[in-house]
Amino acid sequence: MRATDSAEFLGLVPALAGFTPRDSIVLLPFHSGRTHGAMRMDLPDPAVDPEEFADAALHVLLRVPDVEAVAVVVYTDDLAQQVPDGLLLPWVPLIEALLGTVHETGVHIVEALCVTPDGWSDYLEHESALRALSTIPAAPGLPGVGDVSGDQLAGAALPPSDLAERERVGRALCDLGEVLDRELRGAPLTGHQNPQALAAAMLLDDVPAFAENLLDKPDDLQPFTCATLLWCLERPAIRDAMLVQWATDLGFGNRALAAQLDFAGAQQTIPDAIGQVFLGRGARPDPDRLGCALHIVRLAAARAPRHARPGALTAAAWLSWALGRSSHAGAYVDEALRIEPEHRMASLIGTMLSAAVLPEWSLRRG
């Protein structure tokens, strides 16, 4: 895609981001005259020091390899103000601090634009002028991009589910829990256990195979399959191994589960290769595979009784983060912590998001 002027460039930003940002500042890093994606940050609280924000934004920008130039776009609900000297754009002190900090590093400024509810303008113009939003061409259709009219939180809401679905999954969780509790205590089965619960318990004999088979039929999440997945995602060692497997493959999943169980038994530390995947380092995962896993855990969270949701929500947060969708990850973390305020994994991901920690593979060009 090529942009010949600022208006055409603004038309491309939603296609590059996958959504139309709101109350955001967007950085588009360039290398050899090309950009490969967009980095979105919330506009800060007005009390935040612009220089501190600029330093933090620059730190994130420079994590992208070989950055030579950057375009900056502010999307704000604030309006431009007419002042005696002309037009005063919103967030000028913030943009001046950011552009100054970027310039000091030798990174070239391609564009510095502002989009408001009543028009758009250019921070780099000597005398700013407001152009109509209608002059921004529609974002081009790209394979796999879809509708980009929503903002950064579009698509984060869980799929719809009804009370009957949640009750069926709740009963399945209870029946599965009874079978597993008897197995744990070594108590014999009485013959009154639900046969579907017995079959579901057998899936746990090979958790990596169960996790892999879920990807084959992502929309066929029957109540006992859903209950088994929720049971797994509520147990940190199993949940983390499943996430690492979905980011790699079945073989790596087997290694990850064995390492997690050994770690839980205090027998040894987690191998670096497994920990690196969990931290977003190493080979870039297959985004379709991660997306399929995210679809499954979102379905499970939607159909789970409220008390059984935090594990699935936390898994959805990590998978979203791994796909570069930190805004969605934040929404899932917030919901998990509303249900279980002391959830350790959700709190950890929330800390990572607050610190603008991004998976390294999302910063590398394809």
Image (spheres, grey):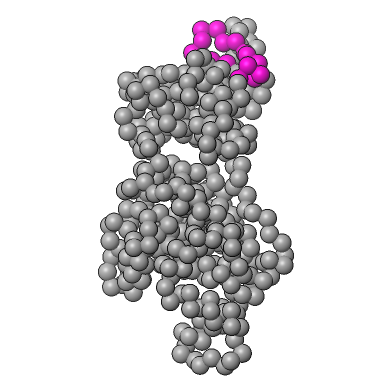
Taking the spot 55% from the left edge, 59% from the top edge, the residue there is 218
* Viewer-nearest residue: 129 or 78: 129
Q: Quadrant of residue 87?
A: top right
Position above or below: 176 against 108: below
| Rendered location of residue 161, percent (x, y) | 68, 59
Label total for image: 0
Position above or below: 177 against 219: below
Q: Main secondary structure of the magenta part?
A: loop
What stretch of residues is rendered in magenta? 121-136
The C terminus: image quadrant: top left
Residue that protrudes farthest toward the right in the picture: 163
Horizontal side of 241 relative to 327 (left or right) equals left
Taking the spot 27% from the left edge, 69% from the top edge, the residue there is 268
| Rendered location of residue 169, percent (x, y) | 63, 70
* Viewer-nearest residue: 4 or 56: 4
| Rendered location of residue 309, percent (x, y) | 58, 63
Q: Is residue 80 visible?
A: no
Position above or below: 348 against 214: above
| Rendered location of residue 354, percent (x, y) | 47, 44
Q: Is residue 248 magenta?
A: no
Taking the spot 59% from the left edge, 86% from the top edge, the residue there is 193
Q: Is residue 57 visible?
A: yes
Taking the spot 62% from the left edge, 14% from the top edge, the residue there is 131
Position above or below: 283 against 209: above
* Viewer-nearest residue: 70 or 211: 211
